[in-house]
Image (tube, rainbow, N blue to C red):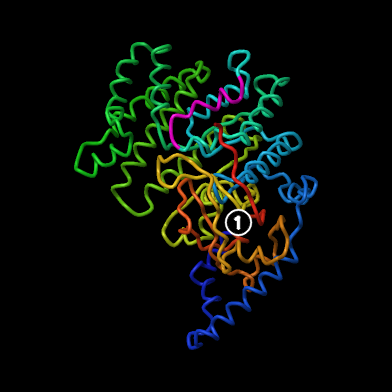
Amino acid sequence: MKHLIAVTIAAALLALAATAHADEADRQRQVEQILSRITDLYAGKAMEVEDFADLEPLFDAIGERRFVLLGESTHGTHEYYRWRALITRRLIEEKGFDFVGIEGDWQNIQRVNDYVQHRTPEGTTAREALTSHSRWPQWMWENEEFEEFVQWLHGHNADLPPDERVGLYGLDLQDPRDSMRAVISWFEENREDDAEGVSEAYHCLKRYEGGLGDYARHLYQGGTSCEDEVRRPVTILRAVLEEDPQVDGAWNAKQNALAVKEAEKQHRSMLMGGPHSWNHRARHMHDTFLRLADRYGPASRGIVWAHNTHVGDSSMTEMHERGEVNIGYLLRDSSGDDDVFILGFGSHRGTVIAGQSWDMPHREMELVESHHQSWEGLLRETGRESFLVIFGDRTRSRENLVALPQRAVGVVYNPPAEAYVATLLSLRYDAFFFIKETRALTPFE
């Protein structure tokens, strides 16, 4: 598929610009004709989805691919969590998938992983395992929809031997404070001689009460970095594992130490401007996922849950023009198109959970109806309420490649202001699940 990058976003957008000499009325007519043709094409490819049995063609299309990436166009939509959970359950039960990586921090999700793998005290509940997140936005994982999936995974693993249980892991590095505490705790319990030095090394970051945001401001003002300090625990843990790969808890401690090291680097890279900070986070998520695949073995199969902006191949969007990459692009590049399947999600209207600004309490908001010349606006015109499109030769042929804006709602949402990403939909994903009207997920009270 990578050879198709020659059909750049800029070139595809020319299809909507019509002729340079057309007046505005003519140009609009030509644009509408193009959109009408693409709408008819997608309407013909759309497969209505009313219940889970209607997704059979999706599993046929996934086939024996090793990695499946499941997106979302918001972080606060009930249907995205519900359908991702149902798809993931089948991939685990019938196709033998081994682990799930989600857009959460390593140590926070490790507590949930301990629960699903039956390593928590008897009587622990899914909600107790989930209500340990120290950073905003807690609702992304502290919600009833995800709780139901976690309970299912705990039950699925109940009768399996430990080495066959399906794992659940955080791929992100947004707040490394819990990871620092976990690394220090491991050293205090297993390597007392190094514990004080590791604690002192992490003090370089822990002294910033406002977290890494304050650290980044310190660097911007010319302060010294903590780069050397946060490398030290990683170096020690690598040596420990080289000597004995089976040291209890050392592998997990190393993942936490790597999350701290990479989080420091991500915030340090903000000084460079441009795509560097975003790309560093994307590469960490990609590398963490592949470390999990390596740990589970060469035949292992994994699933990703993350926003469309992370899983939908960035090279098929305007992100490419800005020099940005994401886990979808990186996995296709490192593992090959034939081993990766990407499913995007989108909707036209409804309600959503988000905050009006960073660190503000979440609330239910109305989702602004999609722009009529966006992908969501086009898919709305197919006349179907909920459907799946699996992309093939026709939707990927040059004459049918049109870059349109695709909605991207994050954890902060201020309607009517909206974010859209110019996208070659049929190349960004292998399939797309459109739901005309969605509702907000249900955060814990």
Name the one closer to the observer, 195 or 76: 76
Identify the residue at image location x=62%, y=22%.
117
Could you say where residue 46 lies in the image, as x and y percent from the top left? 73, 61
Residue at 65% x, 37% y: name it: 301
User: What residue is drawn where x is 48% and y is 56%?
Assistant: 415
Is the C terminus in the top left, top right, bottom left or bottom right quadrant? top right
Q: Which residue is mark 1?
A: 349
What segment is highlighted magenta in the picture? Answer: 125-136
Q: Is residue 442 or residue 15 the one in the foreground?
A: 442
Viewer can see residue 431: no
Horizontal and vertical percent position of residue 390: 70, 57
Q: Is residue 215 magenta?
A: no
Outermost residue on the right side: it is 53
Closest to the observer: 298 or 371? 371
Q: SS class of the residue under badge 1?
A: strand
Reply above or below: 53 against 139. below
Residue 278 visible, this angle: yes
Residue type highlighted by circle 1: Arg
Residue 300 spot, x, y in % from top left? 65, 34
Question: What is the count of numbered marks?
Answer: 1
Which quadrant holds the N terminus? bottom right
Coordinates of residue 424 in the picture (x, y in percent): 57, 63
Q: Is 104 displayed left or right of 154 in the figure?
A: left
